[in-house]
Image (cartoon, grey):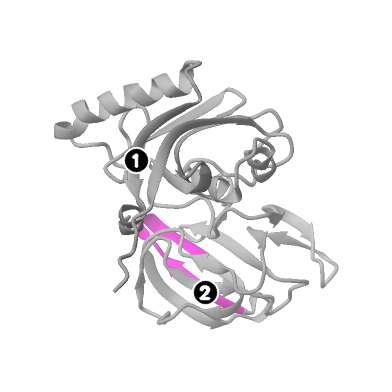
């Protein structure tokens, strides 16, 4: 039997710094990094930053991330330890601790509602109480946001909830409606198909797949029509605010503050861009 050789890998901690010119994807690529870093960065801040509306030219971002190499060849990204995003006067930092991400005060970045029902993607139509319908021609209220995406793109539940409707809803085509706590409902239209096991009365969790992007109903092309209401009144999904996440427990605060302070130093100081962390094996990498 031939013994499989364990390949030594090197892990470097890297601070990535960039500035938005046209999009987050373009900005990350412009500094020599890959799309996977963009997706991971955006997912960490998915409860805080709306990367469809809030991104502006001149916004700056920083990421402290592990980069894994084999014989000086980049293999993949590892854990993201800290992130920072600055847009205008608003700044946000996130620090990894025990599998989650927290702000400087130790409040979880994870909230009851996500900002969007799709992983970071291109947006095609924003909330408007009066827009010209692309098919019917007249001016009608549009109480939601259209997310352009390829047919079959998974659609996530933005929050824990219960399916109260699944089926054909005239112009919305195949649609799923969820009921959430505190009087909220969310609506997902023009689906191509439904998620596995989705039925009326089913409990779903945040980020559970409830359907897939399509072009059913009155639709000019593949996209998701996403809407949100509270107490039976439609709200602008891009501007709705939700309660903050949970704080770190008292017993963990001292340890968190120590890690946070170390990462703040990385984010704010002009320290060397790379620092070797450790040498691991390919077997260890595959375990997590």
Residue 81 visible in this rendered orientation of the protein: no
Other-residue count near label 2 (Cα within 10 Å), few / some / many at <14 / 14–19 / ≥20: many
Front residue of 129 and 89: 89
Q: Which residues are magenta?
A: 174-186
View extreme (left): residue: 251
Kindly report the distance in space between the C-alpha atoms of the residues bearing marks 1 and 2. 42 Å
Q: Which residue is mark 1?
A: 279
Q: Which residue is mark 2?
A: 211
Asked if residue 204 lies in the magenta stretch, the reply is no
Front residue of 83 and 276: 276
For the C terminus, which image quadrant?
bottom left
For the N terminus, which image quadrant?
bottom left
Q: Residue at x 49, y 80 (%)?
A: 166
Q: Position of residue 119 (x, y in %)?
A: 54, 57
Of marks 1 and 2, the one in the foreground = 1
Element on which disc 2 rests: strand
Task: Tell me: 142 left or right of 152.
Answer: right
Q: Residue at x 41, y 81 (%)?
A: 200
Mark linked to residue 9:
none
Q: Residue at x 53, y 59 (%)?
A: 117
- Magenta stretch, main secondary structure, is strand
Q: Residue at x 65, y 81 (%)?
A: 170
Residue 173, above or below 208: below
Figure quadrant of residue 86 = top right
Residue 146, above or below 97: below
View extreme (right): residue: 137
Q: Position of residue 51 (x, y in %)?
A: 60, 44
Residue 187, above or below 55: below
View extreme (front): residue: 1
Other-residue count near label 1 (Cα within 10 Å), few / some / many at <14 / 14–19 / ≥20: few
Front residue of 107 and 37: 37
Residue 73 visible in this rendered orientation of the protein: yes
């Amino acid at each position: 039997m031939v013994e499989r050789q364990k390949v030594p890998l090197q892990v470097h901690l890297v601070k990535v710094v960039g500035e938005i010119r046209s999009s987050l994807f373009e900005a990350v690529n412009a500094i020599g990094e890959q799309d996977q870093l963009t997706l991971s960065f955006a997912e960490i801040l998915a409860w805080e930053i709306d990367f469809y509306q809030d991104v502006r030219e001149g916004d700056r971002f920083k990421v402290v991330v592990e980069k894994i190499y084999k014989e000086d060849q980049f293999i993949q990204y590892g854990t993201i330890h800290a992130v920072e995003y600055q847009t205008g006067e608003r700044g946000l930092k996130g620090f990894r601790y025990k599998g989650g991400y927290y702000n400087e005060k130790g409040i979880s970045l994870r909230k009851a509602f996500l900002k969007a029902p799709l992983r970071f993607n291109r947006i095609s139509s924003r909330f408007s109480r009066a827009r010209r319908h692309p098919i019917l021609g007249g001016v009608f209220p549009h109480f939601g946001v259209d997310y352009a995406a390829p047919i079959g793109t998974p659609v996530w539940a933005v929050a824990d909830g219960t399916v109260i409707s699944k089926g054909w809803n005239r112009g919305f085509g195949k649609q799923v409606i969820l009921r959430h706590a505190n009087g909220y409902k969310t609506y997902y239209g023009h689906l191509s198909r439904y998620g596995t096991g989705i039925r009326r009365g089913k409990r779903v969790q945040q980020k559970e797949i409830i359907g897939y992007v399509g072009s059913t109903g009155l639709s000019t092309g593949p996209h998701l029509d996403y809407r949100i209401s509270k107490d039976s009144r439609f709200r602008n999904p891009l501007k709705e605010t939700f309660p903050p996440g949970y704080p770190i427990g008292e017993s963990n605060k001292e340890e968190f503050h120590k890690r946070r302070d170390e990462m703040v130093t990385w984010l704010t100081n002009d320290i060397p861009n790379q620092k070797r962390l450790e040498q691991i094996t390919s077997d260890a990498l595959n375990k997590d």
